[in-house]
Image (spheres, rainbow, N blue to C red):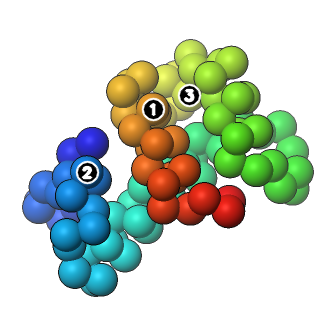
Amino acid sequence: MQLDIDGIEYDTDQYETYNVYTQNKIRSTVYQGYKAMRNVIMDNKCQGLKLNEVKLKVNADREKIKKYLPFDDEEINSIFIFMEKVFPRL
């Protein structure tokens, strides 16, 4: 997935090759996207669902995500792939 952060494009497939500062920026940006999707899909923000549970709910109602956030199907999938890779315990 290509990310544009402060006018610079980064590729999440090359994540390991970036320095620690850049990795933190990428991780933070993708996590913000994940949190935005989680907040849209959740009725009760205090449920504390795991990543897999959020993924199931998002996949069940992608139209709701697309209605409120500027993500397409590819971006949603890329966010979850990156989250599973970088935040495996979430």
Check residue 65 in the rendering and tell me which mark sits there, or answer none: 3
Query: For the residue marked with disc 2, what is the amino acid?
Result: Asp
Question: Tag 3's secondary structure?
Answer: helix
Gap between marks 1 and 2 measured at Cα: 14 Å
The amino acid on which the numbered mark 1 sits, given as a three-letter code, is Asn
As measured in the structure, the alpha-carbon distance from the residue carrying label 3 to the one carrying label 1 is 12 Å
The residue mark sitting in front, 3 or 2, is 2
Q: Quadrant of the C terminus?
A: bottom right
Pick whichever, 16 or 53, lies toward us: 16
Q: SS of the residue at dot 1?
A: helix
Residue found 70% across the figure and 34% down from its top: 41
Q: Earlier in the sequence, mark 1 or mark 2?
A: 2
Q: Select label 1 or label 2 by which is in front.
A: 2
Vertical comparison of 17 with 82: above or below: below
- Which residue is found at the position 27% from the left and 42% from the top? 1
Name the residue nearer the viewer: 28 or 6: 28
Instruction: From this view, report whether residue 37 is shown above or below residue 5.
Output: above
Residue to which mark 1 is pinned:
77
Mark 3 is on which residue type?
Answer: Ile
Tally of numbered discs: 3
Q: Residues within 10 Å of mark 3 (few under 14, many from 20)?
A: many
Left or right: residue 43 compared with residue 90? right
Q: Which residue is mark 2?
A: 13
Marks 3 & 1, CB-CB < 8 Å contact? no
- Pinpoint residue 82: horizontal percent, then vertical percent: 44, 50
User: Can you see residue 4?
Assistant: no
Residue at x 83% of width, y 55% of height: 48
